[in-house]
Image (spheres, rainbow, N blue to C red):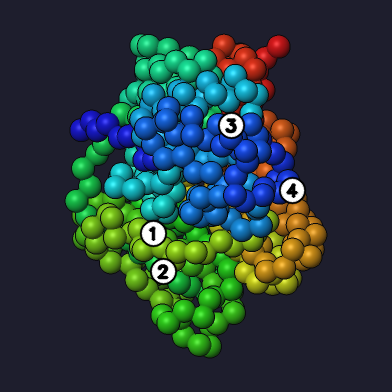
Amino acid sequence: MQKTVVASEPVTVLDGRKEDDKIKTGGSPKGLSPAGISIPKLRAAIGGRVIAPEDDGYDRARTVFYGGFDRRPAVIVRPADARDVARVVLLARETGLELAVRSGGHSMATGFGDTGSVGIGGITLGGGIGYLVRKHGLTIDHLLAADVVTADGQLLRADAETHPDLFWAIRGGGGNFGVATRFQFRLHPLETIVGGMLLLPATPEVIQGFIAEAEAAPDELSAIVNIMPAPPMPFVPEEHHGRLVVMAMLVYAGDAETGERAVAPFRALATPIADMVRPMRYPEIYPPEEGGFHPVAVARTMFIDIVDRRTAETIVDHLQASTAQMAVTQLRVLGGAMARVPVEATAFAHRNRRVLANVAALYGHPDEAAVHEAWVGDFAAALHQGIAGTYVNFLGDEGEARAREAYPGPAWDRLRAIKARYDPTNLFRLNQNIPPAT
């Protein structure tokens, strides 16, 4: 099955100031923004919505998911089509203004990740690790073509036959090569799954056993394992509140009877604190999300290849030592279909890694940042297993060295050469940046 998906309402931001600069409301003389953009002329040229700093909805439009950021762009454009995107790209190129691009969300598109609100453009361009990673692989493994507006304002169709170098690069290379406005995917029918949350006590034995069972499970089963203090939620008995638990999301992409057998070994690891795993339709795995939630967090992502008793003990010890409002380790068992694609086939080059690990601390006050950053750094160092590697979609503002770790082996040099071809001036740089080869 093939389906063409339009990236839902991409948000294009022209930013003429640093984040600490202030904007005076009420506009500037002759309709010019502080960056020198004529807002009336821009509105006349753009079919979509143009949001200036003095407009209603500006603060909502500039707000990102994570808290602690206060970017105040000169203007925000919600393009109506690819032609709008091209006009904004050319404007940024001609004026020298910084350009940031943000996907508008999944909207009514198929859920390819593990959170319904994640932008389909972002998850696709970075690789796409979701609930079906072992059964069907990455999102990019089923991308057939994409329409991309490049730095010179051209709209290019990239696929295996047309601009194959660009097509290779956008499958994992992020937003470094242009603005993707349309995707064509190969989709797979999935009537029902066996899935949901399973909550177990988090002992080293349970953590080690859970990962071992996830690796031994059939490819139809993918697991996202969060080890964290149990939140005070209605389905968690009060005596477990604040105690470490394994909060796992399981998805078996197949029939109910076989799925129940596949889930049984996880239930046998310990007496479940809560068991919500059941047959359901696939969209039900994406629950409604709480609006207005903007956590302030510090996090680190990496790939590891073994979760033995020592690793499990390291996880428990560090989580128990955290003073954050919420401390969490997330482990995603990979392999399966993802690992059967050759490493060199796409810019995502971590096909042979076994586990994606993330550590994070959520906190409430900015003056606590240094403490939690140190905790995350020490924790990540303790989990590190000798081979550097990061998943670009989970990187924060961590510098070029960390972006470099997302593209091991020859991938980095190949991406830089392609960047030089399609974006030689590095117009698309407000991202996990791959600088053009010089």
Amino acid carrying mark 4 in the image:
Asp
**First along the sequence among labels 4 and 1:** 4
User: First in sequence: mark 2 or mark 1?
Assistant: 2
Determine whether 337 is above or below 366 in the image.
Answer: above
Residue 185 is situated, as x and y percent measured from the top left of the image, at 30, 31
**Which residue shows up at 28% across the image and 55% down it?**
283
| Quadrant containing the C terminus in the rendered view | top right
Foreground label between 2 and 4: 4
Residue type pointed to by label 1: Leu
Q: Position of residue 244 (x, y in %)?
A: 59, 74
Q: Secondary structure at mark 4?
A: loop
12 relative position to 80: left or right: right
Observer-nearest of 342 and 67: 67
Question: Which residue does the numbered mark 3 point to in the structure image?
Answer: 37
Q: Hey, what amino acid is under mark 2?
A: Leu
Residue linked to disc 1: 250
Q: Is residue 258 left or right of residue 340?
A: left
**208 or 362, nearer to the observer:** 362
Work out how far the residue at label 4 is from the one at label 1, CA to CA, in angstroms.
Answer: 43 Å
Which label is found at residue 198?
2
Q: If you read the primary sequence from the N terminus, does the residue marked by circle 2 or circle 4 appear first?
A: 4
